[in-house]
Amino acid sequence: MTAAFEKLSFQDAAFLRMESAQRPFHVGGLMLLTAPDPIPRGYFRKLARHCGRLNRLWPIFDKKLADPDSLRHPAWVPALDYDPDHHVHHYALPSAGRMEDLLRLISRAHERVLDRHRPLWEIHLIEGLPGGRFALYCKVHHALVDGVGALRMLDALFSSSPDAGIDFRAARPHVQKHHARHGALRQLGTLRSELKKHYAALPQMSELLTGMSVDALLGKRDVPPLPFTAPRTLFNTDVDKRRQVVISDLPLGAMRKLGERYGATVNDVLLAICGGALRSYLRSQDALPGISLEAGVPISFKASQSAGNQVGFIICPLFTEESRPLTRLKRIARVMQKAKGNM
């Protein structure tokens, strides 16, 4: 198989196969930034042009699906018809733009599925926020990159030096032209190796699930629960394609200190906060179940700079039945530590 025809992994393809208009499988990130003071003439237009050239910096932004209308044999091919106007959108909020205006715009942008006939990413540049600020909303399909990979890419955009810049002249890997026809024997060989790789992991996965299941079946406290045991709540219903983006400021320093004091990570603290928020909301609706809600916590296995997804999940109780916030945090930390120790 030539480098021009890149077969999607089983996990990457699954993110495309499970997608629908009501259930998009892209991920997004919103960054609030401060422009230079004074703002140079044409600053935002220049920034938008640079964003349109990110495909030259990151090759994964310069590939698209070989056959967007069929996922029978999903593969990436070079996007020889790449047009930056399809991927970079520049807006200006009304005079004295409010955060509500920004979030409303981002919500509408986030709910739209990405066009599979093009590279599966977008950047939305929004100027006009108070205090000389502007926003960058980045939207990438999960089949293209996972969360850790996306964070590494975003980190490469920033520098601690105001004089640093991105070198778009750096040489890119040569990509050969895609040939549409591939031999059946070659495809069968690729399928065989892919299945062998996934089945090789089954004994370890079976051992992990068995250990976790025994703990749960024995009624042990603060262990990862069995799959499909979460209670039904008023959230268990079909959703439409509308989305609403909201934000909340949390003091990272205080969260880190709280975690260190009680043997928890920052992520554990965030899970405990979410559990408390869900408990308060469901109680206000007189709909709080007697057993805990659960969260699927993504865990990255990425050990290299490779693209694509290398991610798994831990099922963690949010202990919504627990009324004491610190006890909830300690119990979540114990579950997460045990689950990570089994991986």
Image (cartoon, rainbow, N blue to C red):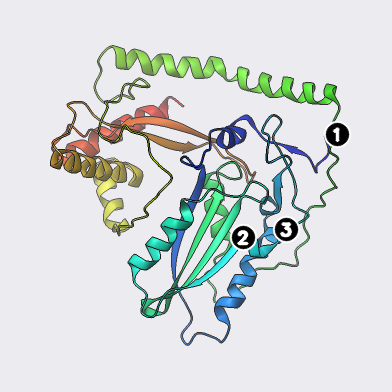
Image check: 193 left or right of 248?
Answer: right
What residue appears at the point 75 percent right and 67 percent down from the top-left corner? 169
Of the image marks 3 and 1, the number of the one nearer the N terminus: 3
Q: Which mark is residue 82?
A: 3
Of the image marks 2 and 1, the number of the one nearer the N terminus: 2
Secondary structure beneath disc 2? loop
What is the distance, in whole Å, between disc 2 and disc 1 at their CAs?
29 Å
Q: Residue tagged by mark 2?
A: 87
What residue appears at the point 47 percent right and 15 percent down from the top-left corner? 207
What is the distance, in whole Å, between disc 3 and disc 2 at their CAs?
9 Å
Secondary structure beneath disc 3? loop
Looking at the rendered structure, the kind of residue marked 1 is Arg
Q: Which mark is residue 181?
A: 1
What is the distance, in whole Å, between disc 3 and disc 1 at their CAs?
23 Å
Residue 91 point in image, percent of width and height: 50, 71
The image shows residue 244, relative to residue 271, as above or below, that is: below
What residue appears at the point 25 percent right and 34 percent down from the top-left corner? 234
Marks 2 and 1 close (CB-CB < 8 Å): no
Image check: 77 left or right of 287?
Answer: right
Dot 2: few (<14), some (14–19), or many (≥20) neighbours within 10 Å?
A: many
The image shows residue 262, relative to residue 71, as above or below, that is: below
Looking at the rendered structure, the kind of residue marked 3 is Tyr
Of the image marks 3 and 2, the number of the one nearer the N terminus: 3
Residue 159 point in image, percent of width and height: 55, 68
Marks 3 and 2 close (CB-CB < 8 Å): no
Residue 232 point in image, percent of width and height: 27, 27
Dot 1: few (<14), some (14–19), or many (≥20) neighbours within 10 Å?
A: few
